[in-house]
Amino acid sequence: MNKQVTFEQVSLNTECFGNPDNPAILLIMGAASSMIWWETPFCQLLADQGFFVIRYDNRDTGKSTSYPPGKPEYTFEDLADDAIRVLDSYTVEKAVIMGMSMGGMLTQMIALRHPERVRGIVLLSSMYFAAGAENLPYSSEEVNEFFASFGQNEPENDHELLEYAIRQWRVTNKSSRPKDVEHIRAMLKLDIERAANYASRVNHSYAQVTGDELGRIAEIQTPALVIHGTEDVVIPYIHGEMLAGTIPDSVLYTMEGAGHELHPQDYIPVVKQIVSRFAP
């Protein structure tokens, strides 16, 4: 079921799976990516295991409110608080919050900003920002070079935009996992078609962090599950190790050979880890 959540001139597109009487899990996708990247089979697997699953488009993605490229009218704190608005709209008092990449960053913030609403957190391919973060490796040279050229030779039509998105996917999702390129092409095409303005997805790169939550994750009191691939070229595996080593009640699940992705090959083992940690 799809539902638009509206407040203060903001509209967020959401979708749910499963029985609303079951314990909830809220899925927050990463930067520049809409909710469809929490693919339906993964959401259905969680629902089949007894969760009420909610996914949604962050601002500037999918069918949610978008702003002019380069001019986001929100902070990361606003994005974190959006998640609570979504829970409110479904009358969910507490939920497991699962975030991928930037979504994991927002999840860390939510655990400290709204601890009374969080039953547990799952951080997938997420970045570590606390003490010692300045000494950690970050994206590969190829990833950095690709994004350094962002804005040059802008795609002039939907075909060029799709080809650009595919090149971005190839650069950021390198790993030993098999690649279904035609499926990814179809997903990216759908992502472009769903977006009010696909170019606005860059706004996540311009949004500011105004609070200090990301440096205080040692204060997180909720149980945590950290999931990270060993071949992640966007956020190296050591970030997962640092997150799990810093958040007090945390468990690290290592996806050997996985990159910056939630690959279909990992759906079942990841769901098993979530159920084991946060059994409905």
Image (spheres, grey):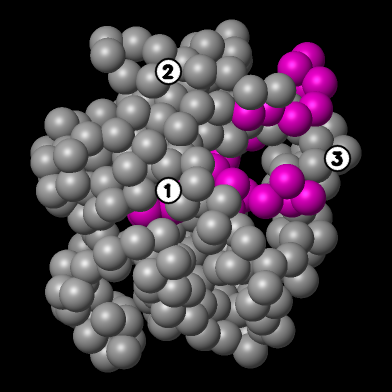
**Quick one: 83 or 127, which is closer to the camera?**
83
Q: Which residue is mark 2?
A: 85
Q: Nearer the viewer, residue 173 or 221?
A: 173
Label 2 vs 1, first from the N-terminus = 2
How crowded pointer 3 is (Cα within 10 Å; few <14, some 14-19, many 20+) is rated as some
Q: Provide the secondary structure element on which disc 2 rests.
A: helix
Q: What separation in Å lies between label 2 and label 1 (alpha carbons)?
A: 15 Å
User: Mark 3 belongs to which amino acid?
Assistant: Gln
Q: Amino acid at mark 2?
A: Arg
Q: Nearer the viewer, residue 94 or 146?
A: 146
Q: Is residue 76 above or below residue 155?
A: above
Image position of 136 (left or right of 86): left
At x 34%, y 11%, the residue is 7
Q: Give the SS element for disc 1.
A: helix
Please provide the residue range marked out in magenta. 15-42
What percent of the width, then of the height, locates residue 201? 31, 50
Name the spot of residue 271 as percent of width and height, x first: 76, 53
Residue 127 is a magenta residue? no
Residue 203 visible to an observer of this rendering:
yes
* Residue holding disc 3: 49
- Asked whether disc 1 touches disc 3, contact meaning CB atoms under 8 Å apart, the reply is no
Instruction: Give the mark nearer the N terminus: 1 vs 3.
Output: 3
